[in-house]
Amino acid sequence: MKILSLHCDYIRFKPVKPALKGAELAKGEEKQIEVKEPLVIFTAIEKQDESNKKILEEYVSNVLDLKDKVKAIKIVLYPYAHLSSSLSNPDFAKKLMVEAEQELKKKKIDVVRAPFGFYKEFELKCKGHPLAELARTIGAETAQGKIEVTKSMNAQVTNKNETYDYKQLLREISKSKLNREKLMDNDHRILGQQMDLFSFSEVAPGMVFWHDKGWTIYNELANFWKEEHRKAGYNEISTPMILDKKLWQISGHWEKYKENIFLTSYEGREFAVKPMNCPGGMLIYKNKPKSYKELPLRVAELGTVHRQELSGVLAGLFRVIKFTQDDAHLYCTEETLEDEILGIIKLIDKIYKKFGFAYHIELSTRPAKRIGDEKLWDKAEATLESVLKKQKIKYKLNAGDGAFYGPKIDFHIKDSLGRTWQCATIQLDFAMPERFELEYTDNEGKMKRPIMLHRTVLGSLERFIGVLLEHTNGRLPTWLSPVQVKVMSFTDKNIKATEKLFHELKEAGIRAEIDINSAPVQGKVRDAEMQKIPYIIMIGDKEEAAKTLAVRKDGKVKFGVKKDSFIKELLEEIKERQ
C-alpha cells in the first residue's frame, strides 16, 4: 500500500462519473464536499496487500500516527490509484477503505471517506510546513517486490549466492518513454527532451540524469548564485551527505521526518542520507569558539539532499527525490537581526528581478505542532512582521503554516503562465541554536546564544530550472543558454570559413556549435530554433566576400554584421548576464 498525506487548509471534491462497476453512488447523488483543516490520506491499495492479514491494522495505525504528527482533527480517506501501478482487486480495495473508515470512527475520529470507484475533480490547498506532505509505503516487505530472474545460457552470471541474467536486467532498466498526451508544449519535460538537457531512469526514481547541456544550465545558475552570495558577504561550505542518526535526533528530524529519510548502516551504526542541510552546518559553527566580532556570520551551501517520495507524485524537475537546495544559515545577535532579514529580502529581490519574476509574500506563523518557548515565538513573529511593515512591504498572513521551529516569510514567484511557486523562504529560529547549544562570547565575555536564520532563494535548483524553462518556453537568456551560438554553412564551399569562425568563438569563451552538413539551410535553421539557441549565424558566399556575418536572433536576420563587433557585444551581454 502506498499513501500520500497532505495537511491542508481545505479540500473540495466532487464525484463526476463512475470509473468502475459497483461505484458507491447512484446517479444524481454526486455533490461537492468540502472539508476544512483536514489531513488528506491519498491511498493506493496494492495487489500484495491482499495477502497481508495485518494491512488494515497497519493502515489505521499509520493514519493515526500522521494525524498526531500534524495535530489534525479531521481525516479524509481518499482512494487514489495513481500512486501505484500494481493495484489490488477493486472489491478488496473498497472493502478495506470502508473498514478503515469504521475503525477510525470507533476511535472517535472525525473522518470523511471519498467515494470509491468514481472519477473525481478535486481542489485543495496544502499547508507549507515541513510535515504537510509525507509519503509512506505500508507493508514494506511485501511491497518492495523482487526482480524475476530469467536464466540464459549466454548471459548468466553467478556470484556465490546470486544468479542473474544481465541482459534481462538491462532490458528492465531501459530508458522509459515520456508520455506527452497530457502535457502542454512548453512543459519542461518536453523541452528537456527536445533540447537534450536531462532524462530520468527507473534505476533512480525521482533523480535527474543531467546531460551535458542541462548540466551547463545548472552550473551557470550555480555560478551566478555563488557570485551574488560572495558580494553579499556569505561564506560557502559543503557538508557530508550521510550522517549519524544522533544528529537527526538532536535536530528533531528523526522524530518528525524519519519516514521520509533514506537510512543506511555502517559498522553497526545507523546513518541517514540528509534530507536537510542545516544540522551539518551547525556542526561547522560549533567547530571552534565564536566571538561577537564574527557575527553576523552568513554561511551558504548548495547542498544535495534526498527525501523519500512515492513514485506516483514525482513530476519531472518539479517533484524529485534528490535535489540541490540553495541553503544559507545566518547567525546573528538581536541587535543585527532585522538588518540581516532585510539583507536577505534585498538579495531575493535582486535575483528574482534578474529572471523577470514577479512575486508576492506571505508571513507564516506558528503551527499547531512546534518546539520552543511561546515567548520566543511571540518575539520571532513580531520581528518578521516589523521588518515587513517598516519597509512597507505588502504581505498576506498565513496563520499556522510556519516551520516547527520558527515562523517564516515565504516568497511566491509568478511565471508567464500565471502559476505561483513558493521558492524563497526566510525562517527565524530560536530553537535550533538551543538544541545544538550554539554559543558566542559577547563584548563582556559572557556566553550567549546566537539567533539563527534559515533561508533559500531559488529553493531547489532542479525545480527552479524547470520553472524557468516553462516561463521562457526554453528561450533562456544568452548567459544561461547551453549553446549560445550556432554557426552553419550555406553550401559546402563555405565550410572552411564556417569552421574558422566556430574556432574563434570557442577561443573567445563562447559556447558554440557548428553545422556543416549538406542539408538544406531551412532544415538547419529549424533544428537550431528547436534547440532554442539565441544566435544563429549563416556563412554564405556574400558573407565570405564581405567578411561579415548574417546573424539570426528571435526569428529576425541582420545582414552585414562585423565579426569583431558581434563577438565583443556578445561577450558583454554574457558578462553582464543580460
Image (spheres, rainbow, N blue to C red):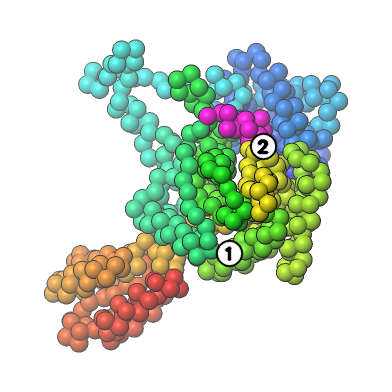
The percent position of residue 467, horizontal first and vertical second, equals 53, 57
Labels 1 and 2 touching (C-beta < 8 A)? no
Residue 311 x, y percent position in the rendering: 54, 36
Which residue is rendered at x = 64% and y = 38% of the image? 437
Q: Say which of 335 and 508 sits in front.
A: 335
User: Which disc is residue 245 wearing?
Assistant: none
Q: Residue 435: which numbered mark, if any?
A: 2
The 10 Å Cα crowd at callout 1, few under 14, some 14 to 19, many 20 or more, is some
- Residue 526, horizontal then vertical, whole percent: 34, 67
Residue 304 drawn in magenta: no
Q: Read off the magenta span.
A: 244-259
| Residue at position x 30%, y 25% in the image | 166
Name the residue carrying label 1.
347
Secondary structure, mark 2, is helix
Above/below status of 243 relative to 358: above
Give the amino acid type for the residue marked by disc 1 in the picture. Leu
Work out whether 68 lies above or below 224: above
Mark 1 to mark 2: distance in Å? Answer: 29 Å
Quadrant containing the N terminus is top right
Point 62% across, 47% down: residue: 440
Say left or right for 248 vs 187.
Answer: right
Count of labels in the image: 2
Q: Position of residue 237 (x, y in %)?
A: 47, 49
